[in-house]
Structures are given as structure tokens and as C-alpha cells.
Amino acid sequence: MIGVDATHDVVIVGAGCAGMRAAIEAHDAGADVAVISKLHPTRSHSGAAEGGINAALGNASEDSAEIHSYDTVKGSDYLGDQDAIEILCREAPEDVYQLENWGAVFSRTDDGRIAQRPFGAAGAPRTAYAADITGHVLIQVLYEQLVKRDILVYEELFAWKLVENDGRCQAVICWDLLDGGLETIGAKTVIVATGGAGRLYVGTTNAYACTGDGMAMALRVGVPLKDMEMMQFHPTTLAPSGVLITEGCRGEGAYLLNSSGERFLKRYAPNAMELASRDVISRAEQMEIDAGRGVDGSVLLDLRHLGAERIIERLPGSRELAMTFVGVDPIYDPIPVRPGAHYHMGGIETDVWGLTPLEGLYAAGEVACVSVHGANRLGGNALMETITFGRRAGRTAAEWALSHTTIDVPASAEVDAERELRELLDRNDGERPWRIRDELAQTMHENFGVFRREEQMQRQGEIVASLRDRYENVYVQDKGEVFNNDLTQALELGFMLELADCMVVSGLARKESRGAHARPYDYPDRDDENFLKHTMVTWHDGTPELDWRPVTITKWQPQERTY
Ligand SMILES: Cc1cc2nc3c(=O)[nH]c(=O)nc-3n(C[C@H](O)[C@H](O)[C@H](O)COP(=O)(O)OP(=O)(O)OC[C@H]3O[C@@H](n4cnc5c(N)ncnc54)[C@H](O)[C@@H]3O)c2cc1C
């Protein structure tokens, strides 16, 4: 049926930690709220987060918002916006206590306070955790709060297009996964909280659903994407699945060893060793592997000296993952690990209230780039960002919605979408989406991975262009209405191809090494004089256009970064 199927004050696309926290806040501010999700909320990828959430509670040693901010600025390789970082670090403790009050069962110190463990590049043990299933705990607690408030969740609706009309975002066009057909959900304000895009890579910690949908949807309505070259590689993922072994293992004291049993980090980060920042450790591992000092393309994560009791109490999930996916019990043997695509520091450009440059459109969580992570995210800061900036986006989107009354969604928006969909479904031959998807993920890994070379990035640009040409002829074999994964995977592939294009354009333009963007062969150093700025990509006639935006500096001038 053509027309708006429902309208709300605030519609949130995504039901992970960011989306649900935003929904709670918008509801409590008095707005009529609905959440759209292609998955059941508790299956959102936030539930996979293991190690914990950062807030300067000071429960393990002296800590403060100031120290947390400094660590985050330094960790970001000075590309993070310091106003946003200061907000995150100042507001984080209250947000964590709020989660606790809602029932989050954090692990405890002996005297009953929230326990905190050390994480990479943190000046104090700051990561609050629930064993190694922190995300699982948080997502249950947030969902409970949604249910308690009776917040409407459109489950298994696949958001495909944002509708911009009259200079405002006013609706979301979705494919109904359960029954088929398009639905248009009108909204005075829309918050995009669709998570990351790790599936652009073949070896990734991210779930199948992490295909960057929200970033691409925003791009298509003219909103810029910031720092898209900044894909973080996590140093401890399992080969070949990409399953994550949490940084919590190193927080508890695990060692990283090469094939000679050497703790090789003494040559790369002699002070912080295994607790250096992720970009530093991923590069060190890759150097060891490339120099032939790896073990079957991995290095070894050794927990044995922690002892069985501590492993079982603090890291039960990691032990189980290692036993299930590589057949190794870390009580007795080291786990083979290697860098894997993990987290997108880049994303939809927002201000510190989650507002994008398009009126009525907000973003929060991994899909957004506010930017608190700059060129390298610290472990534990992503979950915190989902909560603090999810809350802020929910509040501000609700306030705006409550002071503006009407929405106007042109019928042509859904008519055009319907025609586009029909063209795709009526095609009876062509190339299957998974072929293009596999090639994209494989080549992104080869040509836009831990280390980047000019010619490889250029080559990747050509590959993406040719994959986009082939995508014009993509063939959806399943013509059915009910749970047509073939169709949704084709739509996701369309999103990912455009994002890959944005990443390559941004990567080629950044002629320096900073955080996750490491160019040791042509531009080995950070170049603050020319590149202390964000890449910004907008979409014009199907091609990315690059611009720059200055980094916001409040207190911390760039320094050399050593660990
Ligand atoms: C294995 C793993 C472990 C991690 N551990 C930690 C950790 O210990 N600490 C930490 O700080 N960070 C961690 N991170 C990072 C952190 O978990 C994520 O960045 C964060 O949870 C993302 O939350 P989100 O709400 O932005 O997105 P998600 O939780 O991914 O939620 C996205 C939501 O959007 C919905 N969605 C997506 N596309 C569409 C669409 N087209 N239509 C409708 N709905 C859509 C999905 O259904 C889902 O509900 C980890 C990441 C991984 C991969």
C-alpha cells in the first residue's frame, strides 16, 4: 500500500545499545517513540561485546574524567574531537550507575563496588565489566526498560531508505521481513543507530548484520560521512572465523608471543607491552607475521600463567570461544590470534547532541562519528559512547519533535522505492549478490587492511568500481515475500559497495600514518601540519566527493604518541 503506514514523534532505526538507550530517553522526555530493527533487539550486535565499558569510577585506583579524556585523546592519535571526548568522559560515570540501577549485574570488588579492569592505553583500571559478557548483560537490561515503558518495536523491518523532504528527514521506508512489502514509517525526527560495517572485510569480529546500512542511507540523503578510512583492526581475533577474544584477556595479564615464545611487544611498546593501544599491537603482530615469526599466520595469546581459577572466573566466554572455534583450552595452551576488522571509528557526521547536518536526522553509536575515537578507539569506549551519546541523541531528538508538529511525506518517495524494488526483483538473470560480496570482503582485507599502500588502495578503488558496475546487474533468485534474505543481502551489498568507495577515497587522500591508517611504506609518520583534520565524504551523482573538517582541540595539543 502506498502512503504512510504509521507516524511517530521519534523513530529510531536500530535496537542495539545506542538505539535502545536513545529510545528510553526520548520516551522519558515525553515523545511517542518507535524503534525499527532488522533483528530482534537482544540479537543486536551489542550483545556480543565482551570486555566492558569505560567510566572513571575510580574503584580500582585513582581516576578522573580528565585522565580518561587524555587517554582517549592520545589513543585517538589526536584525531578525536576533544569537546565530544570531554563530554563522554564527564557523563560516563552517571550513565554507568544508571545502568546499574536498572539492573546491570556488573562484576564486583570484594567490598561490593563495581569492579574495573585495566584495558589497553588506559591510565587506570577503568573498564567496568560483567565477566566477559558485558554487552549481553547491557542489552538485556535496556530491552527490559523498553518493555517496561511499552515502547513500540517494529521488529524485523529492514530500513532501506530515509525520506528527506523540504530539507528535513521525515520518514523511513522499510522492507517487511516477515510478510514482505514496503512500509513507510513517518517521523518528526529519526535517529539512526544501525551499528558498524565490519562485514566489509572477510576476517571480522562483526556479525552478519553489521553491513553499515545506516551510514549508506544517510550518505544517500546528502549527509557527510567522516573519517571513513579509520577501520580498526582488533589484535586478538581467531583465524579464520574472525571471532573476537576480548582485550579483557590482556587486561587480566595475558601475554602475546611469537613463534620463538618471545613477548615481541617489548620491541614495539616497551612500557605498555600488551596494554598498548590496539593500532600499535595490531601493527606489531602483523610485522611479526610478515617477518615469518608467526604461527600459521597468527601469533599466540598466552593465558596459562593466569591459572585455571582466574580464567574460569573472569574469562569463561573467551575460554569457551577458543575451545569451540580453534580447539584450544587456554588453561593448557596459548590461543592463536591475529588482527581482524573490528570497529569503524568513522561514520555519520554529528554534533555532540547526535544531530547530523540534515534537520530531523540524528545518529548515535557505532554508525555515528561524533568523533570520540578519532583514528583509534580505546577498548571499552564504544559501549560507553552508545550509552552516553544514545541518551543525548534521544533527548534532543525528542525535544525537537515535541516542538514541531507536522510531517509531510510525498507519495512519490514510496512509489520510487517500489519501482526500484520491482526492477531488482523482476530481473531474471545476472550475478548473484554473494559473489560480489565475497570479492568485496576479500579484496578489502588484502588492499585496505592493517597496512595500506598507495598502489593497493588505488587498485581497490578500481576493484570497487568494477564491483559496483557488476552490482547494476545483480540477480535476486528468491522472489518470495517471507524472510527473503536473498533480497536483503542484495540491498546490504549495495550499501557496502558505496561505503567501500568512501573508505578508499578517504584513505588515498590521507597521506600520513595516523592510528588505524598506517602507511609505513610511503608516509610512515603522522603529519599534523597537513592532516590534523577529518576526512568528510558526500555523495554526488553516485560518486564520493572529499572534503576536510578541522579537529576540535580544547586542552591537549598533539604530542608524539609512545606506549
Ligand atoms: C565481538 C565484539 C566485542 C566488542 N566488545 C566491546 C567491549 O567489550 N567494549 C566496548 O566498549 N565495545 C565493544 N565492542 C564494540 C561495541 O560492542 C559496538 O561498537 C557497539 O555495541 C555498537 O552498538 P550499536 O548500538 O551502535 O550497534 P548494534 O548493537 O550493532 O545495533 C545495530 C542495530 O541496528 C539494527 N539495524 C542495522 N541495520 C538495519 C536496517 N537496515 N534496518 C533496521 N535495523 C537495522 C540491528 O538490527 C541492530 O538492532 C565490541 C564489538 C564486537 C564486534
Image (cartoon, rainbow, N blue to C red):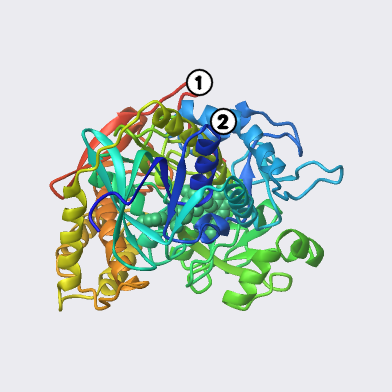
For residue 483, above or below residue 356: below
Q: Is residue 376 left or right of residue 163?
A: right
For residue 404, above or below residue 322: above
Q: Looking at the image, is mark 1 or mark 2 earlier in the sequence? A: 2
Q: Position of residue 418 (x, y in %)?
A: 19, 59
Residue 69 got which mark?
2
Cα separation, mark 1 vs mark 2, equals 10 Å
Amino acid of disc 1: Lys
Toward which corner of the image does residue 498 lie, by quadrant? bottom left
Instruction: Identify the residue at the far right of this view.
Output: 111
Q: Position of residue 408 (x, y in %)?
A: 25, 38
Q: Secondary structure at mark 1?
A: loop
Can residue 532 be seen by looking at this rendering?
A: yes
Q: Give whichever of 173, 453 is nearer the camera.
A: 173
Q: Secondary structure at mark 2?
A: helix
Q: Position of residue 169 (x, y in %)?
A: 29, 39
Q: Is residue 509 left or right of residue 320?
A: left
Instruction: Identify the residue at the far top of this view.
Output: 555
Amino acid of disc 2: Ser
**Label 1 crowd (10 A; few <14 / some 14-19 / many >=20):** few
Can residue 224 be seen by looking at this rendering?
A: no
Q: Give whichever of 515, 367 is nearer the camera.
A: 367
Disc 1, disc 2: CB below 8 Å? yes
Residue placed at 58% from the left, 31% from the top? 89
Residue placed at 71% from the left, 65% from the top? 316
Q: Position of residue 130 (x, y in %)?
A: 70, 53
Toward which corner of the image does residue 59 lie, by quadrant? top right
**Label 2 crowd (10 A; few <14 / some 14-19 / many >=20):** many
Q: Give whichever of 236, 512 is nearer the camera.
A: 236
Which quarter of the image is occupied by the N terminus? bottom left
Residue 555 got which mark?
1
